[in-house]
Image (spheres, coloured by chain):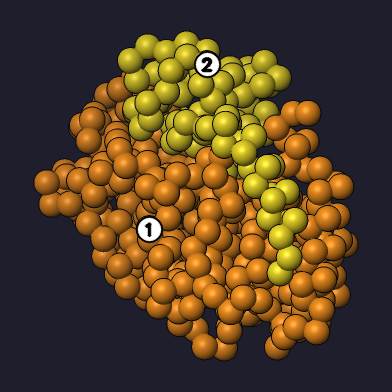
Chain colours: A yellow, B orange
Amino acid sequence: MDLLLTHPCLVPIKMCLAIPAKVINKKENLAYVDFGEGVLREVDVSLVDAKVGDYVLVHAGYAIQVLDEQEALETLRVWNEVLQTEV
Amino acid sequence: MSEKSRFRDAELARRIAEKLDQAMRNEPAVRICHVCGTHEYTITHFGIRSLLPSNVEVIAGPGCPVCIVPASEVDEAVEVARKGIIVTCFGDVLRVPGSEMSLLDAKAQGADIRIVYSLTDVIKMANAEKTKEFVFFAVGFETTSPSTALEISNRPPENLSFLISHRLIPPAMEMLAETEDLNLNGFIAPGHVSTITGLKPYEVFPKKYNIPTVVAGFEPLDILMSVYMIIKQQKKRIAQLENEYIRVVQWEGNIKAQELMTSIFDVVDSNWRGLGTIPSSRFMLKNEYKAYDANLKYGVKIEHGIDIQHGCRCHLVVVGKIRPTECPLFMKACTPENPVGACMVSSEGTCRIWARTTASQPSSTPLD
């Protein structure tokens, strides 16, 4: 419980910070998600279409977006491309 | 390589910094504004400003939802609490100064104020303690507003009502764009607000104000890359809207969240602490949901409060006109332990962020 209260992912102080977490299981609008380092928490997934195994962005107990793993890989490729073009 | 370390790759950061240096050689100075406390944290914590060419300045706009809540709305929450009603809020909100006192001061005087992680916690409490009245002080930008809209649409318990202080970021950016002495050349738009809103609300900045605008993520490389994308536009003498944060933000945003907000809230003009009135910048409950309006339920309405305490310069910090170190109270009368101004309260407030990392800041020469 102490871990839950002190873990930086869960301290409710950063109002627009959202944290990625992996959906472990899901029942209707509630899902258990893993923030990493063994921190699990129940979050509301009403605002997104998330399935088990997806990474979601969680803000103050609500998943607000499903993360796109392909786009994460794409980001670095795009960056390298941008850096190769001259300005 | 883990997700985090990939976006903190020192070699790639060095390459971007070099590119920026080349691009900005013999160029006129550029001033870029971000509007997110978490961006300011990344910039300050990782010393991003020290990596930028001397003619590129990144300033912090009103990106902290807690800092811009006017004193009158804190006063309303305090008054509700003094009536014996349980006021719930996020941790950051607790110490925001009201005209006379913060919610923390009210708590010290015996009011029942409870910090929550999530609105779901409040609903559980209200269901568990049916004989008591609860109010949720709903502070936050578009990242937070959808959860309030969702729970109101689900018809929360009758003993729960809301003080809605939710505000919208794009109207505040528009106010900055129109502030002549700021002379902005670029906007770094907030990544997590954009998760909800999508990119459309930012189209106005390149189109109407000719300001390059890039939605950015929160890793150090995200910030450097977004600065580089803005500089590239500047050099080409074009202004466009671009998305650097493609791994999270989609062009259309979260449509379900947008529909919920539209169905629950009207948008009205509102006062922002330190900024004055901004047109169409605040959510208010629609008529059909007025039963959940704590202002009406408890007859509490305070029009004017004392937003800026004597000597405090939060109103200049919050629009990036001065750096925190230029305020005479910074780290003297105003500290994280005893904040005078709202910018020193929240972990997303510019002064609070600088208080933790002042030593790593460049010299505090005044902005011109």
User: Where is residue B148 shown, x and y percent of the image?
Assistant: 34, 41
Where does label 2 land, which residue? Answer: A53
Residue that lies at the very extreme toward the left in this rendered image:
B288
What's the CA distance linking mark 2 and mark 1? 30 Å
B362 or B96: which is nearer to us? B362
Where residue B280 sits, quadrant-wise, is: bottom left
Q: Is residue B262 above or below residue A67?
A: below
Label 2 Cα crowd, 10 Å radius (few <14 / some 14-19 / many 20+):
few
B239 or A26: which is nearer to us? B239
Where residue A13 sits, quadrant-wise, is: top right
Where does label 1 land, which residue? Answer: B200
Image quadrant for the C terminus of chain B?
Answer: bottom right
- Amino acid, disc 1: Lys
Q: Residue at x 26, y 41 (%)?
A: B260
B119 or B242: which is nearer to us? B242
Q: Is residue B231 above or below residue B17?
A: below
Q: Is residue A83 above or below residue B71?
A: above
Q: Secondary structure at mark 1?
A: helix
Q: Is residue B318 visible?
A: no
Q: Residue at x 59, y 52 (%)?
A: B244
User: Where is residue B355 shown, x and y percent of the image?
Assistant: 76, 60
Q: Chain of mark 1?
A: B
Q: Is residue B358 above or below residue A12?
A: below
Q: Chain of mark 2?
A: A
User: Where is residue A41 shown, x and y percent of the image?
Assistant: 54, 19
